[in-house]
Amino acid sequence: MSKPQFLLSSVAIAVAGFFFTQGVATVATASDKVGFEPTTEQKVTTRQVALLLDKAHYLDQPLDKEMGKKVLSMYYDALDPNRTIFLQSDIDELNAKYADSYAERLKRGDLSAGIEVFERYRTRMNEYYNTAKTLLGTNVNLKTNQSIILDREKEPRFASKDEQLKYWHNQITYTLIGITLGQENDQAKDKAFLDNPELARGQDLVKGDERTPSQILLNRLNRQQQQLARLKNDEIMESVLNNAMLAYDPHSNYYAPVQANEMQIQTNLQLEGIGVSIRPDRKNPDYIRIVSLVDGGPAQKTGQVKANDLILGVAQENGQMVDTVGYTTREIVALIRGAKGTSVTIKIKQPNAPDSSARTVTIVRDVIAQEDAGVHHRVVELPYEGGIKRVGVIEIPSFYLNFKARRSGADINDYRSVSMDTEKAIKALNEQNIDGLVVDLRNNPGGSLDEVVKMLGLFIKEGPLVQIRDNRGNVQVFEDGDGGKQLYTGDMAVLINLGSASASEIFSAAIQDYGRGLVVGNTTTGKGSAQTQRDDLALGSATLTQRKFYRINGGSTQNKGVVPDVELVNIYEGIEFGEREYKNPLEWDTIKPTEYKVEGKYSKSLIDGLIASSKSRQESDPQFKYLLELNAIRALDDDKKPVDVNIDKRRAKNTMIEQKTLMAENARRQATGEKPYTDWATYQASIDALAEERSLMKEHERPKLPESEAYILETARLMFDGKKQIK
């Protein structure tokens, strides 16, 4: 059995949700009771997952009858998050059959109840698709006097079929209105590109889509229905087991083999494949387009694969060619990836060429290092009090570590870790005589506990760094173990936001508690739990919450997160995101603080002064003013309130939102000396061209967006302002 590895990451969320779309409910048919017969491995895996929950989860909550009811309810909500698929009578029927026995079934390795629930869902979805197609074959009235609530998560399930049919018709009509208005917008952008070719930045961005809105929606529904039909038994098992784990907390997860491989890639920063990045084609999303090739990767070495090629099919070594038109990127990635040294054949063609011109290319898979995904550093010059301050910036996307390589005893120089990469970045910045350092942890989901402890040791001289408590109340204190070494001793600040989670919260909390630096930005996710990664299952892998971590001052970051010393504009304002929005989050609490020596001291009066001066700057800074206005515009839409199913009313509201958005954009352009956009279509065309251009660049080579860079500059200014007053 492999040694459990503690993970501190918010990446581990529900993974089976890619097919949980809005759907349907009608009278049950016999077909929804015909599922698959689980294999021995699937049954063993089910027993293993049930045992982990019953005996090893942090909550110490047995998987008993009452918990089984909660698990089953969680599964309904995962399949039907908007409560448009199952009728209340469906839930009553399934509960009568399975609620009391659901937990015991899982512990026996019996997946039959979960399979029947899923097959009922699949039957309903197919009925919904057929209903939608029938409606789209008619002349749909887009000017109704109806309204619809888009977010029905808190609404009751439909009590009758008639009530549900009315909702479906409104929902389909509302979707068709959106596509119609979107197509009008695309046509206006096409005209802008044709009238002003310079807007396209040398790219072919004219869509020229001749399909009707009904045809576009029909194609979309067909793709979704085909994807549903292609779901494999392992993926259905994943949906059942993953939601059993999510009933305990948001970060305990089960991953089927394909998804388990994805998780390893995220934490290891390497993969075994052919070295291409892909995404749906902009003009025809039935096709998946190759966006770029990795320098020196297997695909590039063939000389036969080009950027912009469309993928028509994939064949495994000695296998049949699979027609992948209509496949998702996830499905194609699963086909392309495989063991190093094996071959895969792809069928590709150039855009605007007939399928008959397609060519096949056989490529030998190899390990592809994701160099672009790691730590990056740079120097920013900040005008400050009549001079220039040289600010070092270290961008840390995650606390990554190649666990597999480390466990196998590989040499430390042969694999990547965030602490080693950060150490190199600090040394490089020290040589450039920086005046201060900003550690950018925005949208960093976390990662390895060991790595965040090593990272903190680079900045803190000595002392405790984080506390971990298990479900029996045992507390372990992680200390800085480098003998008092401190690679960086200068001024520093940490930039965080709502997307900063777990290991990011440990790092920023320790810096804040020691007074080692200023913490700036927005309150973090609030993911204060630690998971073990279990690779010892019969199929796939799991992450299981077994510990909670605490600051050295005794407070948990769970739920509450890390509150910054100085708040900046919150780009996630009004968006349901973070631990506080998840179902079944662990509670916030405190334990005994550790003994530690504060390195710096930011007094309350000092912080209050920094807050006041920063607020004044944000209110006048063009970038922050722009972001504040976008927050206000976003608040105009509330999916929990009824919206009109009428194209004229929706067009009028869209026009109002477009005008406000364009005014906000032009205000900041004028404030920064740029030429304002003449109209919405020109603005949108320019945005599309810029996005396309940036997508072809490596991440660290993309010019920084001014609204993002404003956070770096304001954080640095606060750091220097604080230095003048700190005692």
Image (cartoon, rainbow, N blue to C red):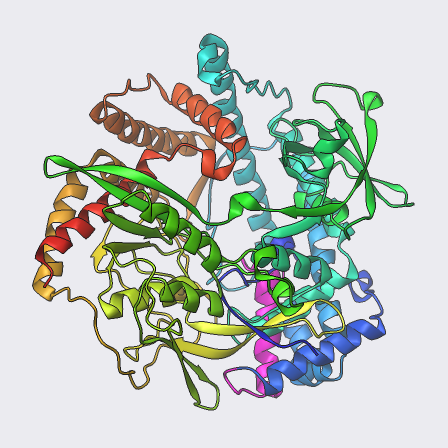
What percent of the width, then of the height, locates residue 391? 27, 44
Quadrant in which residue 246 is drawn: bottom right
What percent of the width, then of the height, locates residue 475? 41, 86
Q: Quick check: 178 above or below 545?
A: above
> At x 61% / y 86%, what residue is drawn?
54
Q: Nearer the viewer, residue 62 or 494?
A: 494
Q: Which residues are magenta?
A: 58-87
Q: Quadrant of the C terminus?
A: bottom left
Q: Quadrant of the N terminus?
A: bottom right
Q: Nearer the viewer, residue 161 or 463?
A: 463
In the picture provided, is 126 more to the left or to the right than 39? Answer: left
In the picture provided, is 42 more to the left or to the right than 295? Answer: right
> At x 62% / y 51%, what residue is drawn?
270
Q: Can the viewer see residue 73?
A: no
Residue 77 lies in the magenta stretch: yes
Quadrant in which residue 263 is drawn: bottom right
In the picture provided, is 496 more to the left or to the right than 368? Answer: left
> At x 42% / y 22%, what residue is drawn?
686
